[in-house]
Image (spheres, rainbow, N blue to C red):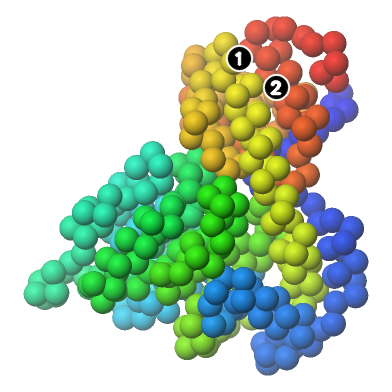
Amino acid sequence: MVTRTVDLRSDTVSKPTEAMRAAMANAEVDDDVLGHDPSALRLETEMAKIMGKEAALFVPSGTMSNLISVLVHCNIRGSEVILGSKSHIHIYENGGISTIGGVHPRTVKNNEDGTMDIDLIEAAIRDPRGEIVYPTTRLICLENSQGSCGGRCLSVEYTDRVGELAKKHGLKLHIDGARIFNASVALGVPVSRLVQDADSVSVCLSKGLGAPVGSVIVGSKSFVAKARILRKTLGGGMRQVGVLCAAALVAVQENVSKLEDDHKKAKMLAEGLNQIKGLRVNVAAVETNIIYIDVVEGAAEKLCKNLEQHGILIMQESPISIRVALHHQISASDVQYTLSCFKQALTGEVQEDNGI
């Protein structure tokens, strides 16, 4: 019988705090489709200020925020976007930019650190003289932190270089900033500086920040005006949405400061896992709250099922690898319990205080 649960499947699984629930219950609301919900306006104003952009728009999900952003920039069918081979937009968003927007993805290999080589990005830009046969490149997308590369952070210097390249070729730059606050904290760089060169940024509020629902898109006033229309087209226009925005504002105000502790606990967990026979972790690559673990014997599925019997919930990535993600509701005690369960599952060694 499971007496304790440690949910490490994703940072999306955290529960609303009491402060969030109270804010939701007491939220001042109106019709946001008509543009009058005061709680939504308050959140959007705050997020635009924090991100250093003119305007912001609350949307139901990160997938929608990225889709809207791409479609605003690539408003002509047959446009092409350059993005990473491991990017969330390319792999995990149902191919929406193509199926809904008629936008063609052109991938560039993501390096282990989450970057794409600048020269390869430039080489992927279509020559306008070939427009009779080629799609037209209109957008470059980055992801920071880069989730499928283990939550690696793109430096401000790298982002600036990509921004300069985009301007040189008359392209737009969108940053999928689902975990941009994790990157900001890890790098010690204000989030507004990290996205300074971006024409648009999507920010997830329900991952590391712990809000129950939603993302925000930021950009220029003209960009957000177009995004607002697309949000309605895609079914993302919600009425008294202030009940969600109120919780999201609490998340922004209270949980950014907790991300550094999440990163420390992730590093602690990674170091402990790497010492267990049968596992391999690149500890140096753990920069934020995500850990990828190689299972040496290739029995990832069996290991996940064994751990689940002890209340440890994790995500299998492949037959030989698993992923865990920490968030503000995972304690240091949870980390130690997780390590003891991994050790028992792989070596049979039981610690007296592991709670099993």
Above or below 157: residue 165: below
Element at badge 1?
loop
Above or below 20: residue 219: below
Q: Quadrant of residue 21?
A: bottom right
Element at badge 2?
helix
**Residue 84 in the image: x percent, y percent?**
36, 53
Residue ranking furthest to the left = 129
Q: Are marks 2 and 1 in contact (CB under 8 Å)?
A: yes
Q: Nearer the viewer, residue 346 or 277?
A: 277
In the drawing, does residue 232 fall left or right of residue 261?
A: left
Residue at 73%, 80% (x, y): give it. Answer: 42
Above or below 348: residue 233: below
Quarter of the N terminus within the rendering: top right
Q: Quadrant of residue 213?
A: bottom right
**Residue 329 in the image: x percent, y percent?**
78, 44
Residue at 87%, 62% (x, y): give it. Answer: 19
Mark 1 is on which residue type? Ile
In the drawing, does residue 296 fall left or right of residue 27?
A: left
**Residue 156 in view:** yes
**Residue 231 in view:** no
Q: Which residue is mark 1?
A: 276
Q: Which residue is mark 2?
A: 339
**Residue 314 in the image: x percent, y percent?**
65, 34
Residue at 37%, 63% (x, y): give it. Answer: 160
Q: CA distance from mark 2 to mark 1?
A: 9 Å
Mark 2 is on which residue type? Leu
**Residue 195 in the image: x percent, y percent?**
48, 66
The residue carrying pointer 2 sits among few (fewer than 14), some (14 to 19) or many (20 or more) residues within 10 Å by Cα, namely: many
